[in-house]
Image: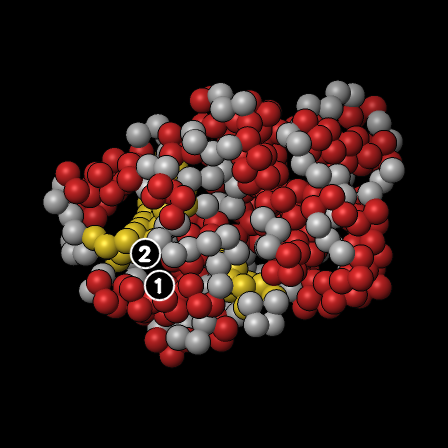
């Protein structure tokens, strides 16, 4: 079987990398952009760092800033109309996962108008044309949406998130500049960072994992583990390392998939508006415990790169628990909730959440086969907490 690997045409990394947006627009002969972002990034001057560069270079653009957390079908549709009204021939996504995902949906529909209902893009949609060009500029170190072929949209009518997987949606250019992330508050830094760790651990243990992806994911686990605490303290080196770590796992998990942590996290955002990173981070230790007997020797390597000493002298049971304990400690150090009850999940909703998680495209990649009964029990365990 052939293993496919899809990456951005071009990516830029490091402080000051956003200056390359002008280089890329000019080199590609692009005429007018639509900047897709949210009002807070405009208000606090983050998106302005990019638009100022466009202004200085005399490059025309308009702004669509109606994106909110857990973007909806309607937000994508409105963005498509905004792009048409602007006469835009390319898009610039500025933000974390929500603006990036919205922008991907807009770009795909502009190039494939038969999917204008948005919901028909769920799963692996048979689009025929590449998205209009997207330049993706990350402002969080977590989702890695700037380098993945996935995006997630919320159907508010049905209270569900759906995942779209499309090789045509990957941004042509990704810009990962840690200076764009310096204003992230500690809570957002922590939750997006643990989302990146979830990507790396799930991608490393998913059914489709293979050597190339494993190399990227394992290194990402190492970088994130050593850098997230510092990034939460707004240390510049921590920010820079987290920007790289989350991108590395994005390159990998985009091509091998994820698991039941994401399958269970998506309904939590759809039902309660819980930020995606918070949902993933809270679930991660529970899912690792659920999967541990189906991961071979991989938890030993996770424990090793997370800084656990003496793993080669440990039994399988011991190094598996050591990996889980290392994740729990990092989570606690970063202020992440330790149970679903703490983040507003209602026990009476667990059966409905279970149905949604079972139907999620990510769940099928989990190393341990999942049933509704097992997912329900896992939700209940994570709801009550370990203590």
Asked if disc 1 and disc 2 are in contact, CB closer than 8 Å, the reply is yes
Query: In the figure, is residue 114 to the left or right of 211?
Result: left
Q: How is the image coloured?
A: secondary structure
Looking at the rendered structure, the secondary structure element under dot 2 is strand
Q: Which residue is mark 1?
A: 79
Query: In the figure, is residue 113 to the left or right of 186?
Result: left
Looking at the rendered structure, the secondary structure element under dot 1 is helix
Q: Nearer the viewer, residue 172 or 18?
A: 18
Residue at the image position 70 percent from the left and 46 percent from the top: 343
**Quadrant holding the N terminus:** bottom right
Residue at the image position 30 percent from the left and 30 percent from the top: 16
Residue at the image position 73 percent from the left and 53 percent from the top: 345
Q: Nearer the viewer, residue 125 or 265?
A: 265
Q: Where 182 sits versus 71, above or below?
A: above
Q: Where 371 sits versus 120, above or below?
A: above
* Sooner in the amino-acid sequence: mark 1 or mark 2: 2
Where's residue 284, x and y in %? 71, 44
Using the rendered view, name the quadrant where residue 364 is placed.
Answer: bottom right
Q: CA distance from mark 1 to mark 2?
A: 7 Å
Q: Which residue is mark 2?
A: 64
Where's residue 212, x and y in %? 55, 44
Q: Where 126 sits versus 260, above or below?
A: below
Q: Nearer the viewer, residue 110 or 171?
A: 110
Query: In the figure, is residue 284 to the left or right of 102?
Result: right
Any part of residue 7 in sight: no
Where's residue 7, x and y in %? 42, 50
Q: Residues within 10 Å of mark 1 (few under 14, many from 20)?
A: many
């Amino acid at each position: 079987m052939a293993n496919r690997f899809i990456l951005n045409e071009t990516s830029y990394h490091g402080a000051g990398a956003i200056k390359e947006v002008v280089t890329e627009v000019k080199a590609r002969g692009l005429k007018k952009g639509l900047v897709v972002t949210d009002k807070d990034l405009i208000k606090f001057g983050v998106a302005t760092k990019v638009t100022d560069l466009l202004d200085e270079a005399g490059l025309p653009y308009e702004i669509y800033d109606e994106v909110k957390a857990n973007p909806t079908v309607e937000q994508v549709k409105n963005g498509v109309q905004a792009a048409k009204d602007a006469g835009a021939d390319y898009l610039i996504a500025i933000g974390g996962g929500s603006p990036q995902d919205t922008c991907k949906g807009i770009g795909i529909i502009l190039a494939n108008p038969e999917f204008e209902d948005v919901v028909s893009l769920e799963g692996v949609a048979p689009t025929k044309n590449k998205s209009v060009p997207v330049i993706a500029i990350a402002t969080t170190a977590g989702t890695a949406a700037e380098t993945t072929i996935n995006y997630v949209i919320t159907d508010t009518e049905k209270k569900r998130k759906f995942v779209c997987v499309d090789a045509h949606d990957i941004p042509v250019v990704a810009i990962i500049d840690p200076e764009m992330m310096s204003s992230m508050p500690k809570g957002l830094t922590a939750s997006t960072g643990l989302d990146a760790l979830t990507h790396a651990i799930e991608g490393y243990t998913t059914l489709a994992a293979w050597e190339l992806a494993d190399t990227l994911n394992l290194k990402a686990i190492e970088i994130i583990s050593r850098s997230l605490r510092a990034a939460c303290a707004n240390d510049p080196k921590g920010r820079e390392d987290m920007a790289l770590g989350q991108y590395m796992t994005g390159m990998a998990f985009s091509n091998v998939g994820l698991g039941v942590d994401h399958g269970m996290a998506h309904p939590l955002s759809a039902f309660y508006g819980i930020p995606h990173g918070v949902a993933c981070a809270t679930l991660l230790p529970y899912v690792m415990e659920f999967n541990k007997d189906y991961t071979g020797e991989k938890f030993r390597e996770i424990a090793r790169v997370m800084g656990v000493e003496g793993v080669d002298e440990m039994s399988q049971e011991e190094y598996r628990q050591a990996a889980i304990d290392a994740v729990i400690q990092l989570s606690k150090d970063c202020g992440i909730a330790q149970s679903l009850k703490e983040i507003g999940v209602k026990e009476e909703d667990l059966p409905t959440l279970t149905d949604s998680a079972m139907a999620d495209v990510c769940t099928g990649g989990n190393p341990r086969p999942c049933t509704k009964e097992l997912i329900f029990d896992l939700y209940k365990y994570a709801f009550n907490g370990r203590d």
